[in-house]
Amino acid sequence: MPITQINLANRTTTELPPDAARPTAAPGIVWLDVSAPTEDDLAWLARTYAFHPLAIEDCRNFNQRAKVEAYGDTFAPPENSAGADLTLPRSNAASDYLFLSLTITGRDDGDLRAQEMEAFLGPDYLITVHREPLPILDAVREHLAANTRADFLLYLIADHMVDTYFPLLDEMDDEIDALEDQILENATQATMQRIFTLKQQLVFLRKITAPMRDVMNALAGTRYGLVDAQTALYFRDAYDHLTRIYDLIETSRDLLGNALDAYLSTVSNRLNEVMKRLTLLTTVFMPISFLVGFGGMNFIQMPFNNPLAFGILITLLVCVPVTMIVWFRRSKWV
């Protein structure tokens, strides 16, 4: 897709031609958005802004953890660099800029899916690169002021990305509560499978939010001159939100661990109840089997020929199990 320039004054978009020159930043800043970048788009960025080849390579692969890297006009590749695409003359070196990888997570049919966005932050420009359409960029564009600084625009995008985690965690908390109720009422094999699925999703979220938190913490500091001191306070707020999100993830993981223990305990108790009933049933039938077997042995005079012996046998067959059941009930075994 072509590179799109977003006008902050009237919130309109303009597609840049392949041979376009570097957009001017007067008045305001330049915001370029690149969705599903092609090799021509990346070549235009590298040629127009003289971005580092490693940053361009990250935009090509989209398989990065959240990070922030600083580049400056002191960069000059070694003279013996192999390949023309890695040769960057010092006269065309870029001004100071930050390269960032940010990650947003959404749910698709119950499965988590991470969407990555790369960003170049300069003194008067912000360039966002992503593979799939990001609705948060449209939301940010609708609430922008014409005099927005580039670093504050980056904060707005990062803040919208961070805010998407809260509804997701709330949804997962509701599922955990439903699982706990299901465990107490009627736990099944599907319950355990859902517990393990949620645990895997929480681990996935933790792997994403931990680097994002580090990025916000770095931007909240004073190490990067491209981030104004006032904007750094906003990044500190985003860092606090990510810290809270990370704590919520850990709490949800603990709740799922407790739910799994409750499930295993419930299954074990259910198995013990079944074994106890089978054991009591076997115990009741043991004397009956003995009496029937004893009465059916080959005697010289069969017990059935003697009414008294037959009556005693029948009485024992009835009284012994009844007595045992009464004893079990008084002992609170049944």
Image (tube, rainbow, N blue to C red):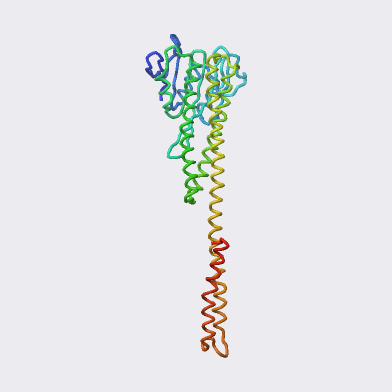
Task: Please name the residue shown 51% across and 79% down the image.
Answer: 314
Rendering coords of residue 310 (x, y %): 52, 84
Task: Please name the residue shown 51% across and 75% down the image.
Answer: 318
Q: Where, quadrant-wise, is the N terminus in this rendering?
A: top left
Task: Please name the residue shown 49% across and 48% down the image.
Answer: 184
Asked whether, in this view, residue 46 is left or right of residue 3, the answer is right
Work out whether residue 73 can be spotted.
Answer: yes
**Residue 304 versus residue 143 in the image, above or below:** below
Task: Please name the residue shown 54% across and 67% down the image.
Answer: 326
Residue positioned most to the bottom: 300
Rendering coords of residue 175 (x, y %): 47, 40
Count how many numbered circles sit on residues in the image: 0
Rendering coords of residue 179 (x, y %): 48, 44
Q: Residue 328 falls in which quadrant of the image?
A: bottom right
Between 149 and 243, the residue placed more toward the observer is 243
Rendering coords of residue 240 (x, y %): 55, 25
Q: Residue 329 falls in which quadrant of the image?
A: bottom right
Work out whether residue 75 can be spotted.
Answer: no
**Residue 111 versus residue 215 in the image, above or below:** below
**Residue 196 versus residue 27 in the image, above or below:** below
Between 221 and 94, the residue placed more toward the observer is 221
Residue positioned most to the top: 26
Between 181 and 53, the residue placed more toward the observer is 181
Between 104 and 38, the residue placed more toward the observer is 104
